[in-house]
Amino acid sequence: MIFYDAIIAPFADYGFMRRALVACLALALGSGPIGTFLVLRRMSLMGDAMSHAILPGAAIGFLIAGLSLWAMSAGGLVVGLAVALIAGIVSRATSLREDASLAGFYLISLALGVLIVSTRGSNVDLLHVLFGSILSVDNEALLLVAAISTVSLTTLAVIYRPLVVECFDPGFLRAIAGRGSLYHVIFLILVVLNLVAGFQALGTLMAVGLMMLPAAAARFWATTVWSLAAVSIGIAFVSGWLGLLISYNFDLPSGPAIILTAGVFYAISIFVGRHGSLRNRYFPGAHFHT
Amino acid sequence: MTASIIDIDDLTVAYERRPAVHHASGSFPVGSLTAIVGPNGAGKSTLLKTIVGLMAPSTGRIVRHDLPRRAIAYLPQQAEIDRSFPITVFDTVALGLWNEIGLWGQIAGAGWRRVADALAHVGLEGFGRQPIAALSAGQFQRVLFARLLLQDAKLILLDEPFAAIDERTTEDLLAIIRQWHAEGRTVIAVLHDMDQVRQHFPQTLLLARETIGWGPTVEVLTADALRRARTLAQGWSNGHHHHAEHAA
């Protein structure tokens, strides 16, 4: 059966494909909702900058312990959080706007990370760090990714209400409950955690893609926060699944294949999405008569 | 002399060391209905934010008499709210129950009815399932007033509640403000329309960073005092915005 051969067989036949698929599911569950909030908070650029900021941290971990999952993750987490913090302080304490300060930080991070990896590793190591290798995800990495998704979803459930209000009407939240910035900081930690998870599978350059593209595409299909998150999860997972198949069948690198698949969903959504798409704008159909 | 609900004691609030409110003192009496007016950059919003606790005094202090955070309701300027946010009218209004449900509580049966009643009160019956993005500025302001109704607060602070709002909505919302006043709640509103202030607000605070006048509206809004406020505003420089002022 052609359908079975194309869609199911690779996963049935190979353990590494199954692990990659499960990794995609775990990544989608964490990155979907986080990406949704990034888009709603107009922090897309922040996500981008933080994903690059993980690189020098992971590189330092690599320098100390080689291609060790834990060392690179811990390094990425620490440096990612530090850069988010410092960029925030720089934009608040100086006249530089936050987007410029973030752009500055991520360019420096990227250059520094590549430099550090190059001092000891080979080009293969560098490619691994930059673009990841979801097909070589082992059980240990899978556990890490799944653990991060679990922590993300649980934490989001706990802070969901204040986080939503803080995006939408920050003055109200601070007036009625105080501590608006607490939820912002918790959210930033979740962003970095999920980027570290994505970094294992997709590399520093691609990790943010599975966060932003599905969330941006979901804006054209859903109109409430929870349904946006659900659609994002769906698009992210299907992108992972189709991307892996494309990568397997055509012998292409898996990370870019997954992100490009998500990109195709994004493009389709821009054109034919149900809310605010080009189709709505130029072919609105009959208007309601009341 | 009536008791005061908020005392302002030699208050200075600064943004990046530039004072927005400068050595202001005075009291809001319990149950008063006060308009805060003044030129742009006069510190009106800053004063409200400091009373709510969103900004900290640089010097001086604000004394809230027997007034916990939950007894204060605050309406931010519409510009500070993301009106494209994917949230329904019902959910927005239900936030007014925050003091009762907190971070995790659920809305009980009576709560659902109260949200529906509040929506009906502001003339938006049946709008509950609409996303707020579909509303006009006037309708959205009605939604925020419904939320204020649910908060059931002793002190209600309104930051430019009628900016860019249609006349009909303004009338309806003014009626709600009068009702709050009749119920003995203290209402403080930042406003620009002097005729509206003269007509509906018995007390006025004329602010130009410092207090120019504070008391019965007819005594405060004199041509002389308004001219003084304008002259002061013209003296504020150092990169501050100079919009055409509409406080006349």
Image (cartoon, rainbow, N blue to C red):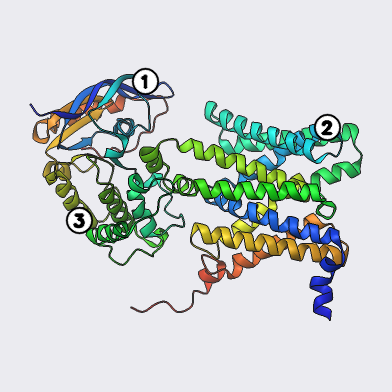
Q: Quadrant of residue B68?
A: top left
Q: Secondary structure at mark 2?
A: helix
| Residue B228, placed above or below residue A16 | above
Could you tell me if residue A202 is visible in this image? no
Dot 3 alpha-carbon crowd within 10 angstroms: few under 14, some 14 to 19, many 20 or more? some
Q: Secondary structure at mark 3?
A: helix
Q: Residue at x 64, y 63 (%)?
A: A234
Question: Depth check: B115 or B244 in front?
Answer: B115
Of pointers 1 and 3, the one earlier in the residue sequence:
1
- Kindly report the distance in space between the C-alpha atoms of the residues bearing marks 2 and 3: 65 Å
Query: From the viewer's perspective, is A121 left or right of B44?
Result: right
| Quarter the N terminus of chain A occupies | bottom right
Q: What residue would you read off at disc 1?
A: B58
Q: What residue would you read off at disc 3?
A: B172
Q: What residue would you read off at disc 2?
A: A116
**Contact (CB < 8 A) between labels 1 and 2?**
no
Could you tell me if residue A79 is visible in this image? yes
